[in-house]
Image (cartoon, helix red, strand yellow):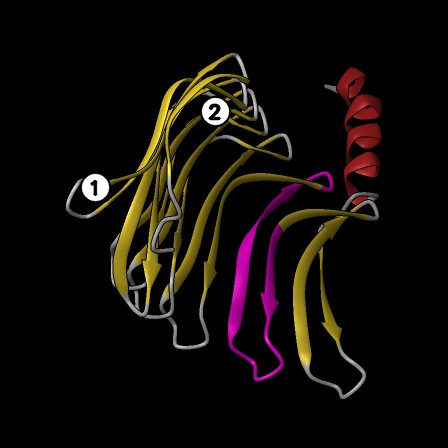
Amino acid sequence: MRYLTAPLLILLAASCGHVATTRHVLDRNGRLRVIVEERAGQKDGMVTYYEADGTMRLTGRYEQDVRQGWWRGQHATGRPSSLMHFEQGLKEGTQCYWGRRGTVTRVETFVHGEPDGTLIDFLEDGRPVLWTHKRKGKAHGPHYHWWFKEGRTTSVLMGTFSYSEYDGRWLEADTTGQLFWLADYDQGRLVHTWVARRGSR
């Protein structure tokens, strides 16, 4: 047992030098803005950010100054505003965002910190605005964009991206199917314009 004494004392001394502490950060008016756990001078543990009125804005976890795991945001009403996942400080997997009414306003997918997968944007009333696909941070694949005027849908733009370049057939039409624009592309190069009229948007 006596041979273990020295190594144990060394471990205890090392651990005592890295005791977790909780720091409260106030603004110039004395209002609480952040509660953060720290260890060895780094953010390490839970952190919560607050609005000026005292409501929680965002909470999540750090590991040695790097965001890790699930982070959750909320509006002043208490309704969720965001749910994000991090691995080693980079967004990873499906991220979701909500508007003040409680409806989903964006869903997107990340891989190693870059948009990679389906991205959908919604209006507060739940109607889609954008449906597209990302690969390594660039638009790649089918793309749909809805346009609105005074609360009503006026037209939809649709086509295909190839690493952020127009590729294949693109068109814009109103809700009855009437074409405003129709053109063919090849890797970003315009091949032919079939219809070109000013749309209602």
Magenta segment: does it hold 55? Answer: yes
Percent coordinates x, y for residue 191 in the rendering: 48, 14
Q: Amino acid at mark 1?
A: Gln
Q: Which residue does the image show at 84% across and 24% down from the upper left?
A: 6
Q: Which numbered disc flags the more N-terminal residue, 2 or 1? A: 2
Query: Furthest residue to the bottom?
Result: 29
Query: Furthest residue to the left?
Result: 176
In the displayed structure, does residue 13 sit left or right of residue 155? right
| Mark 1: few/some/many CA within 10 Å (<14, 14-19, 20+) | few
Helix, strand or loop at label 2? It is loop
Q: 76 or 20, which is in the foreground?
A: 76
Point out which mark residue 178 bears: 1
Name the residue tied to disc 2: 116
Quadrant in which residue 108 is drawn: top left
Mark yes or no: residue 150 visible.
yes
Q: 40 or 155, which is in the foreground?
A: 155
